[in-house]
Image (spheres, rainbow, N blue to C red):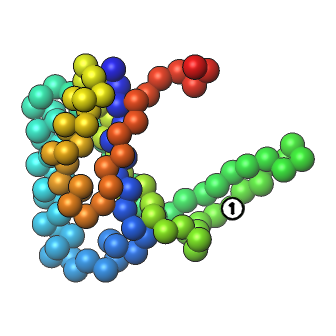
Amino acid sequence: MAYLLLIVEPVGQRAARGVEEGQRLYERMLGFTGELKDAGVLMTSSSLSTAATRLRREAGAPFVTDGPFTEAKEMIGGFFLIDVPSHADAVQWAVRCPASSWATVEVRETGPCFT
């Protein structure tokens, strides 16, 4: 079963870090990525920037808003898509994720959107 580990962090947290601390934390995340690869559970992963665009329809027409969004208090900083046997296994990987020291790691099961 595929699970998404979402890294949810406060807006502005990255900018408040110094370069040295940011590099240290990035190295920890690369180590975690290596653990997922070595265990054979990593499907893909990526860090995300703070730039974003939102789209919704108003009266059938697309309405596009470019970010950053000032009302946002947190952002999705990145994700890991993993393939593990159970939700409990996904949670155990989330517990091991270094980002849980400075952000929230949200575990979501993937699946068809019609159920």
Which residue shows up at 30% across the image and 28% down it?
87
The amino acid type found where label 1 is placed reads Thr
Residue 112 screen position, x and y as percent: 53, 21
To which quarter of the image does residue 109 belong?
A: top left
Q: Nearer the viewer, residue 77 or 94?
A: 94
Which residue shows up at 61% across the image and 21% down it?
114
Which residue shows up at 40% across the image and 75% down it?
12
Up-down relation of residue 49 to residue 41 (above or below): below
How many numbered callouts?
1
Up-down relation of residue 2 to residue 65 (above or below): above
To which quarter of the image does residue 34 belong?
A: top left
Up-down relation of residue 109 to residue 52 (above or below): above
Side of 68 where 48 appears, left or right: left
**Visible in this render: residue 54?**
yes
Label 1: few (<14), some (14–19) or many (≥20) C-alpha neighbours in 10 Å: few
Which residue shows up at 33% across the image and 20% down it?
1
To which quarter of the image does residue 88 belong?
A: top left
Residue 57 screen position, x and y as percent: 79, 47
Which structural element holds mark 1?
strand
**Visible in this render: residue 43?**
no
Residue 72 screen position, x and y as percent: 54, 67
Which residue is disc 1 drawn over? 65
Residue at the extreme front of the image, as rendered: 88
Side of 68 where 7 appears, left or right: left
